[in-house]
Structures are given as C-alpha cells and as structure tokens.
Amino acid sequence: MVRFGETTVLDQVNLELHPREILVVLGASGCGKSTLLRHLVGLRKPEEGSVELLGQDLYSLDEDEREEVLKRVGMLFQSGALFNSLSVEENIAFPLIEHRNIDPQVATMIARMKLALVGLENAATLLPAEISGGMKKRAGLARALALDPEVLLFDEPSAGLDPVTARGLDDLILDLRDRLGVGMIVVSHELASIQTIADRAMMLDLGKVIASGTLDEVRRSANPAVRAFFARTATHDQHGTRPIADLLKAIES
Amino acid sequence: MNQLSRLSEQSGILRLGRADLAAEEKSFIRLRERVFGAVVAGKVRIDVRDVGALDTTELAVLARLAADAESRHARLELVGVPREVQAALDASLHALVSQEDGAHPTESVLERLGEETLMVAADWEGMGTFVARAASAIFVDPLVGKPWSWRGIIEQMDLIGVRGAPLVIFISLLVGIVLALNGARELSQFGAAIYIANLVGVTMTREMGPLMTAILVAGRSGSAIAAELGTMTVAEEIDAMRVMALEPHRFLVAPRLIALVIMVPCLTVISDLMGIAGGYLVAVPAMGLGSQNYLRQTAQMLYINDILNGLFKSAVYASLIGLISCYEGMNVSGGAQGVGAATTRAVVSSIIAAIAADAVFTLFFYVTGVS
C-alpha cells in the first residue's frame, strides 16, 4: 500500500512480469501508474507490502545487493532524463564505465551500438539540448539498454510525441522485445500505443487494480471505468469537476 | 434603494441587476452584506430576472454566496433561472468549495505548532541522512573500490576557484581599502598611522578574509550548485542515476564538496593578500607611509595561528556551503518555482550558517586562548 499524506495512492496492487512479454499498466491520469513504477525500481518504499524484483525483495537487501539488482533493470523516464552535461553517447557509456570498468573507448563503441539499436547513430556526439523530444526518448532507451537489462520499464513513453514518432517508438519497443527477449512494463494512457504493444494489460483506477489479463480480456471487462477508458468518455467524478461542468452547461443552455 | 426594494429585502427576496453581480472585491463585500441582511427564516431568494443570461463570473459570484449561505446554515434560492440551474448549483457547491476547505483546514495554534515542529524535525532528519551519505561518499567509498571522480572534482575546482577568483580579488581589494581608510583618520591622530598594517592584516586574516570569501562563494557557487542540482532533480536526472545504481552523492555531491574544501581556503589566501594590498594602496601612496615600513609591519604582526585559524574556518564554511547547497538542490519540488526557492534558501542558509560558525569559533578560540 502507498499513501501520500491521507490519500491512499496504491492499494493491493500485485503484478507479475514474464520474459519476452510487454505488460501495459494503463489507466487515467492520476490513477497511480507512475507511482507504481517508481516503487518497482526502489525510488519510493511502500508503507505496506513488498517489492520483489527479479526474485529479490528489494527493501530487504543492503545497498550493494540492491545495486546489483538494479543493474539488471533499465528504465526510460517520461522526459528521457538524459544527463544534460554529457553527450548522447557519453550518457550511455557512463554506466558501462562505472559499473563494468570498461575502457572508455570500448564503452563508446558499445554506446554507438546501442544507439544503432534505437536508430540514433547520427546523434552520438550531440548534447541532449540539441536533440528533439523523440530523439531524447530514444537516447534514454539506449541508455536503459546499456547494461543489457533483463527487465525494461517505460514511464509514458509516448507522452508528448506526435503520432508518427509515437508509432515509431511503439515499433521499436516491439522490435526490442523480439530481438532482446526482455520483459517490459509500460505505463501508458495512450490508447493507440497500448493497442499496438500490449501482450498483457492491467488497469488501475484510484490506486486499485480493476482489470487484468490480455488486452481483449481487459477491454471486455464489465467495470464501467474500464469501458469508459476504452470508449474515451468520462465517468465518475474523481476530483469534483463533473458537477461544475454540469452547472456550466445548465447556464449555457 | 427604493421602499419597494427595501420591503422585498425585509421579506427575504433580493432583486439584483447585472451591476450588482460585479466580482470586484468591494462590490462583492457589499453584495454579501445585503444578501445576508435579507435572510429570513434561514432563506434568502435572489431574483436575477433583470440580469438575463448569466456569464461565468456572475455564476461564480452566486455560487460563492450560496456556499457562504450554507456555512451559515441558510439557503440561497435563485429566482428567474430554470430549475435545473438551481439543482446544478446545489449539486456543485460541495465540489466548488471542498478543495478550498481541504487546502485550508481550520487548525488550532497548537496543531499548527505541532505540524511545524514535525516538519522541522523531518528536515533535520533528512539533512542528517544527507550529511551521512555525503561523508560516506567521500571517506568510505574510496576504500571499497569506488574512487573519487577526479574529472568532476577538477571541473568544479575550475568553476568555483579559478572562475571565482576575479570576484574575490576585486571585492577583497575594495574591503582592504575601506578598512584602511576607516582606520587611517583615527590612527593618524595619535601618530600611529603605521598600525594601519596591523588593522588590515589582522582583520583580513582572522575574520574578513575567510568570512567574506565564504559569502561570495555562497552567493556565486552555492546558488549555481543548488540551481544545477535542482534542475536535475526536476528533470528526473537524479532519479535516473538512482535507477542505474549510480549513487548521486558519489557523482554529484562529493566532487562539489571536495572542490569547495580545496578552493575556498585558496580563495581565502587570495582574499587576505588582496585585502592587505588594498591597505597598502591607502597607506603608501595616499598617506605617504614607506612601502618597506608597511610591508615589514604587516609581516611582523601576521601570526601563523591567525592564518591557520582563518584557513580552518574557511574549510568549515566551504563544507557548510556545499552540504546546504547540494541538499537544497536535491530536495527541490514544484518545478521552476521550486528551483528558484531552493536557490534562495541555499544562499541565505549558507551565509547564516557561515556566520553562526564564525561566532562559535571565535568564542571557542577566545575561551581556550588558542589565538
């Protein structure tokens, strides 16, 4: 369980990821998706419950043991989160040099190979400020792949991207799943993207899991929130905005 | 207001025109007084037929009045609007005011004091953890195969020391001149103008050099550190480091702290020398004292203890500036505004900490007779 002050943000959320599988965690904005992801990688500790990552209880490990587990995980943040003072290839080479003591020139070679995987070979020496939003995401993904992770996590990968670039990123995600065989957890609320990449899906609403299974199984759920999500209509009022909207409509009519 | 209107108001009915529903503060306060002056048997009716179609601002005024009525256990009814509008207003009142009530709950002074105390305690706990991690990154990590990032340290030494030197030189020169000028008149009356050398030398090496350098570094480098780390925090770069098992204290905090502890004493030495040079410029060309006399007098009164104490204090100030600035930067929340607030706090807190430390040291040295 996770609370922010008096508000329960996540409650009884259990998920399982298998190799070579893309599990999409979906839901409306503010339902707890990104918070779930942050707990999975040890950025926040839950008030109750445990986080088992690659068979290890993350919060019962000491710092060195937790580091070893995290090296087997890669994460793409919503904005890419590239280190602005380093070039694109230096961003990728950095964990290689620090964790594996790889020679810097060899690390640069590996970085360029990772960039080739994501189609960014020509941006290797550019700084993050010199590349577009879509390119930052690809570079962030290349960095997440630097240590050959077993699990990849994505926080809203299509957010802020135009439809063409978003589709390109979806195709890249599918390609990486097939080529590298890693398991992936993708947090998203972009329907088009979800429909393209999901092997399995889990829908959150107000911090609880309200549907899980294949995407078709989730879509066929009788839960009104699930139906509304896929129909792209609003249902219950989460933050008190619907009655006010009704009042404004009544006045206008 | 005519007699008919007054009678209507006395029977709980208020007839309003468009001008009455103005949202400006004074108009609204007057309207509210009229509305609640017209409450009869817990009810007041507002006739808005003269207003015609309501816009959003007028609706907001009426909604505020309705919410105020509810808090006073009265009911506000609208006349001249469709029933669904009244129903929608009643249904939305809770939504309109609930966020406001949630944001500003009524608390007693004791409750607020308790909350503030807990927040301060949490801050201190956070700072304590931060200091422990920073110390571990500097002193323990190199012993377990995680060496210092010398590239980072040298970069920071350049930013803090080399690029900060011109400012320290300029300010210290001016301070030396000011000290000498202030002392010159008084000392000359007693034929003791040569003791300007003592005044400037002792003041600069014991106090002004270390403290002024610390203040300049806090303003220039402390703010830069807090802003840079704050921006990295907002952009999730620090989180990305943690997820990649790259400890931010090792790669971001330690290089800055080490560079500060190395460069601030160096800048202090420069400050001392430039302050003495400032005094020289007043004493020799302006007051006609002999150059050799001035320099000999300066050398005679400069005790190694004073210089070492000054350097020790400057190293402590540097640590405080580094810890506070890094802590504020890495605990930013709230986007650009948060970064700005953290930068301000870093500078102000660093200066206060340095001056407080100076007071403690001065008292300690005085009591123990160290200098």
Image: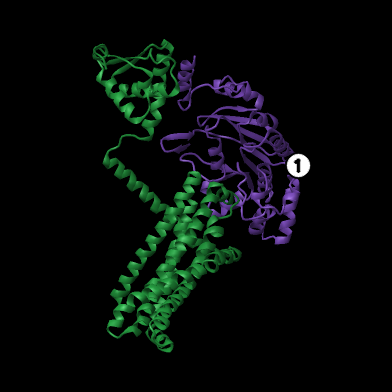
Q: Kindly identify which residue carries mark 1.
A: A179
Instruction: From the top left corner, tell me how far across and down residue B246 is, in percent.
Output: 58, 54
Return the residue nearer the eye: A157 or B191. B191
What color is chain A drawn in?
purple
Return the residue nearer the eye: A168 or B135. A168
Name the quadrant containing residue B352.
bottom left
- Say left or right for A75 vs B347: right
Q: Residue at x 39, y 71 (%)?
A: B208
Q: Secondary structure at mark 1?
A: helix
Return the residue nearer the eye: A215 or B56. B56
Instruction: From the top left corner, tell me how far across and down residue B279 is, in percent.
Output: 40, 78
- Say left or right for B366 vs A191: left
Q: Is residue A58 visible?
A: yes
Name the quadrant containing residue B12.
top left
- Residue A21 higher or lower than B17, as above or below: below
- Residue A175 higher or lower than B71, as above or below: below
Chain colored green: B
